[in-house]
Image (tube, rainbow, N blue to C red):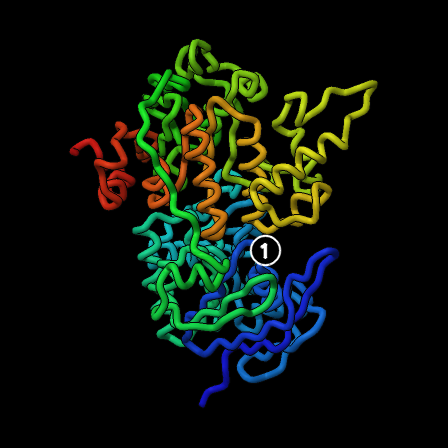
Amino acid sequence: MNAPRLQLSGITKAYPGVVANSEVSLTVLPGQIHAVLGENGAGKSTLMKIIYGSVKPDAGQMAFNGQLTHIRNPNEARALGISMVFQHFNLFDTITVAENVWLGLDKSISLQEVTDGIQEKAARYGLDIDPARPVHTLGVGEMQRVEIIRALLTNPQLLILDEPTSVLTPQAVEKLFVVLRQLASEGCSILYISHKLHEIRALCTACTVLRGGKVTGVCNPAQETNASLSRLMIGSEPPKLVHNPRTPGELRLEVQGLSLPRDEQFGVDLHSMDLQVRAGEVVGIAGVSGNGQKELLYALSGEDCRAPAGSIRMGAHDVSALHPGARRKLGLHFVPEERLGRGAVPTLSLAQNLLLTRNDAIAAPRFLGGWLKLDVLEAQAQRIIERFGVKANGPGAAARSLSGGNLQKFIVGREIDAQPSLFIVSQPTWGVDVGAAAQIRSAILALRDAGCAVLVVSEEIEELFEVCDRLHVIAHGRLSPSVAAAQTTLEKVGEWMSGLWSAA
């Protein structure tokens, strides 16, 4: 028999205050699509970084193609035939897509050859991207395409994918699955991390489950149900969402004829957008990344104040030219799609990160003689940690020390805790495990039931159907008419994401 493509034995890694991996063993066969499943903070990403050479284990052995190996850095991993697509992207904002991809490849390859390779892979696998675009102009979904293409260009023997479909449309997911199955049939092994249980069951032939940094089970996911996989992962099934019927109240957000020219070369022009969100309802916006979501959210949050007078109103107030702080005073709280950098400052503690968007007397106490009441601030952060089940080493933990899902829970909790009258959230459960996703969605519905107006922008259509009362679709900088979520289908919304609603 052929040797396993990858074999881990007794892998252990500890950080101050937490053991990320404890004596983890894992075997991946050639041509196998192997899932690694676990809740946020279970140690999945740390384990993948150890395999890829970006983190050094404290103990344990790793064999690749039957040979014991010690991978000291990602360059050595790539030389062996291991590639990885990270959940948090490793891209330089100020250079182009092609230049970013080129950085990780053999320098004997010219930039033009890399550009041609990107275009070939993009066309072959349906991962549309322009090699000449600067990365800072890309949306999250587009950045993910860059990472996937970069990994595929190395022709890997082992491909590690950390939440690869979190911001892809159902159609794009199906295309990606075709690619992954083809790679597996050619002998490439795939380690697949995802919180989408139905994807794991449809795609993977083996699954290792982690809980608290330890292996708690190995199974064939095709023989499991979503419920049984959930029990293996978190010890129970996530609670069912309760979506109570409700009559919407007063108008909290009104967008009328909003047109905005792009403010950067690769941006998207917004065309005559109309949108209303009322108290006590959740309105969703679906769409493929890069179709104007970023530009619309910048205009709504106040980061872009170029909107024509009267085009954006909160209740009786024309907020078109107001900056984010002024809109927060009117009750708007906002969760951006980028967690680190916009949603939180990586090096600041969770308590200090409250100061970014909270100006109420409890969350951000007034300066007293130039001093902050840090004990009050830390107590507020601790309350959010406990309320939303955030796994962190206390209010003093740096934002960058949290797993992606736990940081998302804290950021969403920070804004919900402010009791907004208008709540706008982008990609609310990107990279979040099933239990935490259910908790965030329940919190959104609780806000709605308490009379808050909620706008959710997401590329996960199933999520929008779970929480929304009405849906819009955004494509090519235009917004479709709204449709009641109960009166449409996932397939119809998927069609509209190509801009096909005019005929309908």
**Residue 373 vertical position relative to residue 254 in the rendered view, above or below:** below
Which residue is denoted by mark 1 in the rendering? 41
Coordinates of residue 145 in the picture (x, y in percent)? 43, 51
The answer to which image quadrant residue 200 occupies is bottom left
Q: Is residue 500 above or below residue 188?
A: above
Which of the 4 image quarters holds residue 177?
bottom left
On screen, residue 177 versus residue 72, left or right, reads left
Is 329 positioned to the left or the right of 361 in the image? left
Q: Quadrant of residue 492?
A: top left
Say which amino acid is labelled 1: Gly
Of 393 and 66, which appears nearest the observer?
Answer: 393
Q: Which quadrant does the N terminus fall into?
A: bottom left
Asked if residue 267 can be seen in this view, the reply is: yes
The image position of residue 155, as x and y in percent, is 46, 68
Q: Secondary structure at mark 1?
A: loop
Q: Residue 113 placed where, x, y %?
A: 46, 59
Q: Extreme left residue here? A: 503
Residue 46 position within the rendered picture, expressed as x and y whole percent measured from the top left: 61, 61
**431 up-or-down from 66: above or below:** above
Is residue 145 at all visible to an observer of this figure?
Answer: no
Residue shown at 37%/30% (left/top)?
282
At horizontal 54% and vertical 65% (from top left) the residue drawn is 210
- The answer to which of 467 and 57 lies nearer the viewer is 467
In the picture, the quarter occupied by the C terminus is top left
At horizontal 49% and vertical 60% (from top left) the residue drawn is: 235
Q: What is the residue that sits farthest to the right in this orientation? A: 369
Q: Nearer the viewer, residue 414 or 110?
A: 414
Q: How many marks?
A: 1
Q: Residues within 10 Å of mark 1 (few under 14, many from 20)?
A: many
